[in-house]
Image (tube, rainbow, N blue to C red):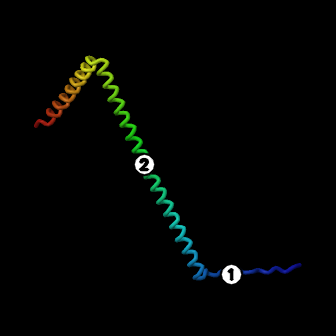
Amino acid sequence: MSTATLETPTTTSPSAGDRAIDTVRQVAHVAHEARLLKTLAADTVEDGLHAARRTVTRRIHDIEDLRDAATYRIKRAPFTTVAAALGAGILLGMVFGWFGTRSARRNRP
């Protein structure tokens, strides 16, 4: 039969040098994470600006297409276009007049 020996674990606290090295590593890690977050934020802002510029450019093209289509319609059928514009104007005038009289009646004492 062999004899067993029991070794008690020795717990030593880290030395000042070890703690300083750990602190430097943690500071370096936090600085690296901060740089990554800064880069991510800059990329997100840049992507948003690019999307906004692209949307504005598309809308400008859409407005130009609408203007070209209106010019074509006016040249193709001027009387129909004028009649449609007159009808739309009368309809809008009636709607705004109705809303105006409603609010005027509501504000009376």
Identify residue type, mark 1: Thr
Q: Which residue lies at the image location 31% right of the left edge and 18% below the top edge?
A: 76
Bin the neighbour count of mark 2 within 10 Å (Cα to Cα): few under 14, some 14-19, many 20 and up: few
Q: Which of the marked residues, 1 or 2, is nearer the chain's N terminus?
A: 1
Residue 92 in percent (x, y) is at 23, 27
Residue 17 in percent (x, y) is at 59, 81
Q: Quadrant of residue 102?
A: top left
Which residue was labeled with disc 2? 48
Outermost residue toward the right in this view = 1
Depicted 99 relative to depicted 54: above or below: above
Mark 1 vs mark 2: in front? 2
Which residue was labeled with disc 1? 10
Q: Is residue 75 left or right of residue 21?
A: left
User: Which quadrant of the figure contains the C terminus?
Assistant: top left
Cα separation between marks 1 and 2: 57 Å
Q: Which residue lies at the image location 27% right of the left edge and 19% below the top edge?
A: 78
Dot 2: what SS? Answer: helix
Q: Which residue lies at the image location 60% right of the left edge and 79% below the top edge?
A: 18
As rendered, which of 56 and 29 lies closer to the eye? 56
Identify residue type, mark 2: Gly
As rendered, which of 94 and 63 lies closer to the eye? 63
Depicted 12 relative to depicted 40: above or below: below
Bin the neighbour count of mark 1 within 10 Å (Cα to Cα): few under 14, some 14-19, many 20 and up: few
Residue 80 in percent (x, y) is at 27, 17
Depicted 24 relative to depicted 34: above or below: below
User: Which quadrant of the figure contains the N terminus?
Assistant: bottom right
Residue 5 in percent (x, y) is at 79, 81
Q: Quadrant of residue 12?
A: bottom right
